[in-house]
Each structure stands twice: as C-alpha cells, then as structure tokens.
Image (spheres, rainbow, N blue to C red):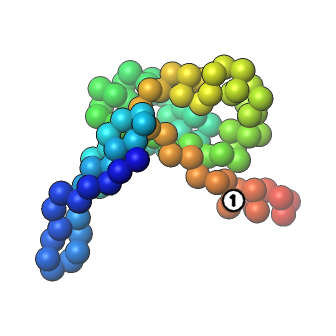
Amino acid sequence: MSFKILKTDQKSNARTGILKTAHGTIKTPVFMPVGTLGTVKTTTPDELKELGADIILGNTYHLYLRPGDKEIEKMGGLHKFIRWDKPILTDSGGIPSFFIGKR
C-alpha cells in the first residue's frame, strides 16, 4: 500500500492524493459508500462502479454477527462474498459492540 500527495493547499493544508492498495487505486478525498453488512442498500456492485465508487465501508462487528466470519470464509473472503473487486475499508465495530453490549 502506498499514498502519494498530489496537491496541497498552502492556506488550509487540505490535500489531494492517491492511495494504492492491492485491490485498486483510490483518489482522495473520497466519497465512501457505507455497506455496513457488506452491501450498500438498493445498489449493486456494478451500479456502485458506474457511479464512480472506488471503495466501500463495512463494519467488522456487524459482519461478524451476520453472516459471520465462518460463512464469509467459506465464500472465499469478503471481496468474493459481496462481489466487490475494489478496496474495502472495514472499521473495528468498537462503537456498536460497546453500545449493543450495554443493553
């Protein structure tokens, strides 16, 4: 993985760049559709690509609960499970696990 800064604004330090991963290149800043359980509701992977999505966001805790890590592993990993060949960012799911555990 690598990140290259393309341009920096001198007044605000805002920047644009390119993040290269094993699954593809992401131009930053980026709009990242949220697919908590591996899917962006009402949108297919092909539609996301047509819209220009370079990456989607998933939630590790929710994916662990449903469908479960064993099921995802059986399907060949998260990319194959959700039919997405571009980068995926998964967060730890720490916030939901903290609040759900408090019920």
Would residue 15 be found to the left or right of residue 102 on screen?
left
Which of the two residues, 85 or 38, is positioned nearer the viewer here? 85
Residue 37 picture quarter: top right
- Please provide percent x and percent y for residue 43: 45, 27
The answer to whether residue 28 is seen in the rendering is no
Q: Residue at x 23, y 59 (%)?
A: 5
The answer to whether residue 81 is seen in the rendering is yes
Q: Residue at x 40, y 47 (%)?
A: 1
Residue 14 picture quarter: bottom left
- Please provide percent x and percent y for residue 79: 54, 28
- Please provide percent x and percent y for residue 89: 50, 46
Q: Residue at x 68, y 61 (%)?
A: 95
Q: Residue at x 62, y 27 (%)?
A: 77
User: In the structure shown, which secondary structural element does the residue marked by tag 1 occupy?
Assistant: helix
| Residue pointed to by mark 1 | 94
Q: Extreme bottom residue here?
A: 11
Above/below status of 77 relative to 94: above
Above/below status of 49 relative to 7: above
Total numbered badges shown on the rendered structure: 1
Circle 1 packing at 10 Å, graded few (<14), some (14-19), many (20+), is few
Would residue 71 be found to the left or right of residue 55 on screen?
right
Which of the two residues, 84 or 34, is positioned nearer the viewer here? 84
Which of the two residues, 46 or 91, is positioned nearer the viewer here? 91
Above/below status of 19 relative to 47: below
- Please provide percent x and percent y for residue 52: 29, 34
Q: Extreme front residue here?
A: 1
Above/below status of 83 relative to 29: above
The amino acid beneath tag 1 is: Gly
Quarter containing the C terminus = bottom right
Which of the two residues, 98 or 2, is positioned nearer the viewer here? 2
